[in-house]
Image: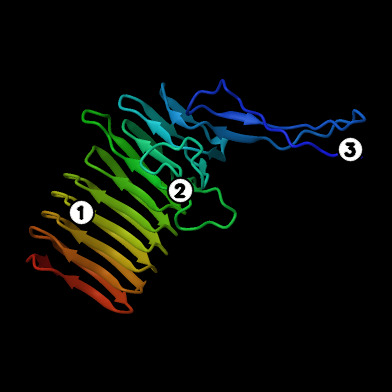
C-alpha cells in the first residue's frame, strides 16, 4: 500500500515587502496531473529595502510576519486593497515576536476612499480581538507625512498606535480590536472622523500635547474614550453609546477641552479626574 507524503517548499529568494504569487499542482504515482490550484498572494516579512506600491490588483495580500518600513522608505497602498495578517509571526521579530505587526519608522501612504476602503484585517476565518498586533507608527524625525484615510482595521490587539510624527488621519474605523487607536506622546496631532465598533478600549490618548479628536463615534466595548496625562487635549463632537463601563474618562494634566458629546453607558457616562478643564 502506498501513502501520500506531505512536502513543503521554502522560497529563499524573496524580498520583504514585494508581492509573490504561488499556486500548486500535484502529480500522482500514475503520472496524472491535477489542475492548478488558486493562487495566493504573499508579502514576505522583514525590513523593506526599497519604496513600494501595493496595487489593488494584488488584493488580498497575506502577511505572515512583521513588516518593517524603516526610516527613509515609503509604502503606498492603493484604494481597495485588503491586507490579511496571520495570527502567527513566522519571523519572531518586532515589539510582539509572537504575532504580526506593521511597523512604520518611515512613511505609510494608505489613502482609500469612501467606496474603496483599505482594510487591515485578521486572516483568521473566525477573527479574535488579538489575532495580530496592529499598525505601529513610530516615525523617526524628519520623515515625510504619513497619510491614513478611509481605513478599516480589525482583529488587532492594538489596532493603530501613533507616536509623535507628521500625520494626516481621517475616516478610520477600528472594529473588534482590544484597543482601537492609541495616541502616545504626540504633539499637535489632529484626528478626524473616527469610528469604533466593539473594541474593548476604543480610543486612548496618553502624554500628548495640543492634540485633538473631532467627530468620533463609539459603539460597544468596555471604555469609549480615555484621556490620561495629556496637556490641552481637545475632544469635540463625540457620540459614545452602549459601552459597559465608562463612556469617557478624563485624567489629564492640563486643561482638557470637551465639546458637544452624547454619552450612554451601563455604568459611568463621564469620569473626570483631578484636572480642571473646559467641558461643555
- The reply to whether dot 1 and dot 3 touch (C-beta < 8 Å) is no
Q: Is residue 194 left or right of residue 40?
A: left
* Percent of width and height locating residue 127: 53, 56
The mark nearer the N terminus, 1 or 2, is 2
Is 8 situated above or below 260? Answer: above
- The reply to whether dot 1 and dot 2 touch (C-beta < 8 Å) is no
Depth order, front residue of 7/249: 7
Query: Which residue sits at x=83%, y=34%?
Result: 34
Label 1 sits on residue: 206
Label 1 Cα crowd, 10 Å radius (few <14 / some 14-19 / many 20+): some
Label 2 sits on residue: 132
Distance (Cα) linking label 3 and label 2: 40 Å
* Percent of width and height locating residue 266: 33, 79
Q: Secondary structure at mark 1?
A: strand
**Which label belongs to residue 2?**
3
Say which quarter of the image contains residue 225.
Answer: bottom left
Query: Which residue sits at x=25%, y=43%?
Result: 163
Distance (Cα) linking label 1 and label 2: 22 Å
Q: Secondary structure at mark 3?
A: loop
Q: Secondary structure at mark 2?
A: loop
The mark nearer the N terminus, 1 or 3, is 3
Q: Is residue 106 left or right of residue 86?
A: left
Distance (Cα) linking label 1 and label 3: 62 Å
- Disc 1 vs disc 3: which is toward the camera? 3
**Which label belongs to residue 29?**
none
Label 2 Cα crowd, 10 Å radius (few <14 / some 14-19 / many 20+): many
Depth order, front residue of 40/210: 40
* Percent of width and height locating residue 258: 17, 64
Amino acid at each position: 500500500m502506498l501513502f501520500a507524503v506531505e512536502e513543503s517548499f521554502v522560497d529563499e529568494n524573496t524580498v520583504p515587502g514585494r508581492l509573490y504569487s504561488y499556486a500548486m499542482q500535484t502529480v500522482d504515482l500514475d503520472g496524472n496531473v491535477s489542475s492548478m490550484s488558486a493562487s495566493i498572494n504573499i508579502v514576505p516579512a522583514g525590513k523593506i529595502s526599497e519604496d513600494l506600491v501595493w496595487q489593488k490588483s494584488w488584493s488580498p495580500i497575506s502577511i505572515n510576519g512583521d513588516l518593517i518600513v524603516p526610516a527613509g522608505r515609503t509604502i503606498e497602498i492603493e484604494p481597495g486593497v485588503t491586507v490579511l495578517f496571520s495570527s502567527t509571526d513566522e519571523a519572531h521579530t518586532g515589539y510582539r515576536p509572537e504575532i504580526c505587526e506593521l511597523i512604520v519608522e518611515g512613511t505609510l501612504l494608505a489613502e482609500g476612499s469612501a467606496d474603496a476602503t483599505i482594510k487591515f484585517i485578521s486572516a483568521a476565518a473566525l477573527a479574535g480581538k488579538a489575532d495580530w498586533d496592529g499598525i505601529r507608527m513610530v516615525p523617526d524625525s524628519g520623515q515625510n507625512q504619513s497619510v491614513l484615510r478611509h481605513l478599516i482595521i480589525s482583529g488587532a490587539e492594538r489596532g493603530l498606535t501613533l507616536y509623535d510624527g507628521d500625520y494626516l488621519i481621517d475616516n478610520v474605523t477600528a472594529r473588534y480590536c482590544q484597543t482601537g487607536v492609541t495616541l502616545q506622546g504626540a504633539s499637535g496631532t489632529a484626528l478626524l472622523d473616527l469610528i469604533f465598533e466593539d473594541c474593548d478600549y476604543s480610543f486612548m490618548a496618553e502624554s500628548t500635547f495640543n492634540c485633538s479628536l473631532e467627530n468620533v463615534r463609539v459603539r460597544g466595548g468596555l471604555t469609549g474614550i480615555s484621556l490620561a496625562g495629556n496637556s490641552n487635549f481637545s475632544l469635540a463632537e463625540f457620540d459614545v453609546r452602549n459601552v459597559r463601563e465608562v463612556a469617557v474618562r478624563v485624567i489629564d494634566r492640563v486643561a482638557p477641552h470637551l465639546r458637544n458629546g452624547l454619552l450612554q453607558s451601563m455604568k459611568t457616562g463621564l469620569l473626570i479626574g483631578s484636572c480642571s478643564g473646559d467641558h461643555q
